[in-house]
Image (cartoon, helix red, strand yellow):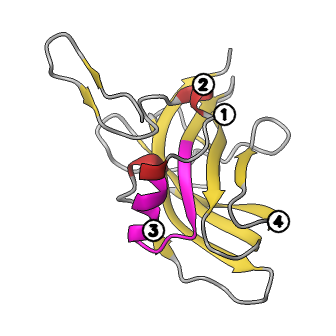
Amino acid sequence: MRRIKLSITGVIVCLALSACEGGRTGLSQPASNAEVAAAKVINCPIAFSTTYAERNSVNGLDVMITWKNISGKDLKYVYMEVGFKNAVNDWVDSDISNKNSEIIKFTGPISDGENHWGGWDGKHPAVMYSPEAKTIHIKKVWVDYMDGTKSEVIDTSNLMSSFGEIGSKP
């Protein structure tokens, strides 16, 4: 079971499944039973464990996501629409593309039940460039299955494990 952290004054309550453990340390954690159950409620074919980004020296945002295939099928491709919000919870545009979200793609095959970690950490271009971004959000997910079928686009904005913090590279 994941921890719930409270501040001494009780003002800050961390209920987010992955945000409590967030950052790099959470990346090694597979999706919990609660995260799997939450994903199944919205018919999402994958369950997120950790969503995290790191800011590089030129404000590029390198994305790292841990998730599990819970679809019942093997996955060929997984697509995620990723966006970032500022300190007042508004979407931010990339300084380079002027878009407020980007599509990232994982290539399979990814077996049913398999935990997967994917990152864009210097081996790939940063997903977005913005000094204002404070949090990362996975807005939508859709998949192509190995059998040739496709899932619907799933709005993941209400899954607590689909958003996370932005850290700085060490």
Residue 136 is at least partly visible in this image: no
Residue 149 lies in the magenta stretch: no
Disc 3 marks a residue whose amino acid type is Lys
Badge 1: few (under 14), some or many (20 or more) residues near its Cα, within 10 Å? some
- In primary-sequence order, the first of circles 4 and 3 is 3
Q: Compared to 139, does 24 lie above or below?
A: above
Q: Quadrant of residue 130?
A: top right
Badge number at residue 124: none
Residue under circle 1?
28
Task: State which mark lies toward you, 4 or 3.
Answer: 3
Disc 2 marks a residue whose amino acid type is Thr
Disc 1 marks a residue whose amino acid type is Ser
Q: Are marks 2 and 1 in contact (CB under 8 Å)?
A: yes
Residue under circle 3?
40
Residue pictured at 80% horizontal, 80% vertical: 146
Element type where label 3 sits in the image: helix
* 3D distance between C-alphas at marks 4 and 2: 25 Å
Badge 3: few (under 14), some or many (20 or more) residues near its Cα, within 10 Å? some
Residue under circle 2?
25
Q: Are marks 3 and 1 in contact (CB under 8 Å)?
A: no
Q: Residue farthest to the top?
A: 8
Which span is picked out in magenta?
A: 35-50
* 3D distance between C-alphas at marks 4 and 3: 21 Å
Q: Compared to 170, does 66 lie above or below?
A: below
Element type where label 1 sits in the image: loop
Residue under circle 4?
108
Task: State which mark lies toward you, 2 or 3.
Answer: 3
* 3D distance between C-alphas at marks 1 and 4: 19 Å
